Image (spheres, helix red, strand yellow):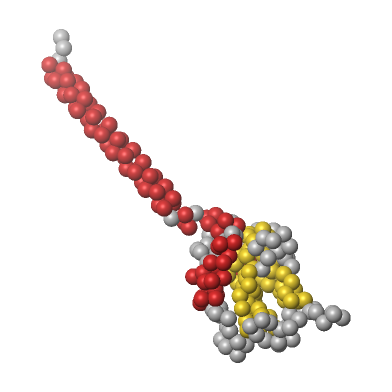
């Protein structure tokens, strides 16, 4: 004959299991909702702030070097010095020169154009790019080259309009100057270029 006490205990256990099952389901659903919400928030933060992605980090200045190679005066009275930027990593580069301008007898900004007419060059790791500078008529004063480096060429101003805007900005913050006037440095020209760009300046003298 069945034990009435045992039956009551079994019935209570079944009822307790039935009551607890939806609570466990609700708890699991809450954890799933919390996890998916956190993942969505993290993705939104990355896309709203692309600088947080590793591939958009700026290149450290210590990875960039620039050498100045002096040249003798030719028989025609011309002298072409060479600037040689070199990177420890592959990157795109824009070369800005603040050099002697014979027409105004002053230091003035120029954007260097390469042989193919472009102003941006893709540099391989360890590659030294040759930047010829005509110093035939320059007095023995400090001139400078400013290398703007980015991980992607699209981060640098490449169109004619962008180049004109850049020169206008550079000449606004660092206008053409006489040799005895103060020179301009990276902090002065930084607003003229966008974020994600590393600037390295190298003074040189054509003595």
**The C terminus sits in image quarter:** bottom right
Relative depth, front residue between 11 and 40: 40
Residue 178, position as x, y percentages in the image: 60, 87
The answer to which image quadrant residue 167 occupies is: bottom right
Q: Is residue 148 visible?
A: yes
Residue sticking out furthest to the right: 75
Left or right: residue 91 versus residue 10 is right
In percent of width and height, residue 46 lies at: 44, 51
- Is 4 in front, or is 11? 11
Check the image and name the residue furthest to the left. Answer: 4
Name the quadrant containing residue 2. Answer: top left
* Residue 13 visible: no
- Residue at point 59% right, 59% down? 159
Q: Is residue 97 left or right of residue 170?
A: right
> Which residue does the image show at 55% across and 76% down from the upper left?
171
The quarter holding residue 152 reads bottom right
Task: Residue 146: give x, y in percent of width and height.
Answer: 62, 72
Q: Is 8 on the left-hand or right-hand side of 54?
A: left
Estimate the x, y position of residue 71 in percent, counting from the top left: 80, 78
């Amino acid at each position: 004959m069945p034990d009435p006490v045992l039956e009551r205990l079994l019935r209570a256990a079944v009822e307790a299991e039935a009551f607890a099952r939806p609570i466990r389901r609700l708890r699991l659903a809450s954890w799933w909702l919390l996890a998916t919400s956190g993942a969505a928030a993290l993705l939104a933060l990355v896309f709203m702030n692309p600088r947080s992605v590793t591939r958009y980090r700026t290149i450290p200045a210590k990875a960039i070097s620039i050498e100045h190679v002096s040249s003798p005066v030719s028989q025609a009275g011309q002298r072409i010095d060479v600037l040689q930027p070199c990177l420890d990593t592959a990157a795109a580069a824009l070369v800005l020169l603040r050099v002697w301008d014979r027409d105004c007898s002053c230091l003035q900004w120029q954007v260097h154009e390469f042989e193919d007419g472009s102003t941006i060059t893709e540099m391989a790791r360890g590659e030294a790019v040759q930047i010829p500078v005509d110093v035939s008529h320059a007095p023995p004063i400090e001139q400078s080259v400013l290398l703007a480096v980015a991980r992607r060429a699209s981060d640098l101003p490449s169109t004619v309009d962008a180049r004109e805007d850049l020169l206008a900005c550079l000449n606004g913050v660092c206008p053409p100057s006489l040799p005895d006037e103060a020179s301009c440095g990276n902090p002065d020209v930084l607003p003229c270029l966008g974020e994600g760009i590393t600037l390295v300046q190298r003074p040189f003298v054509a003595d």
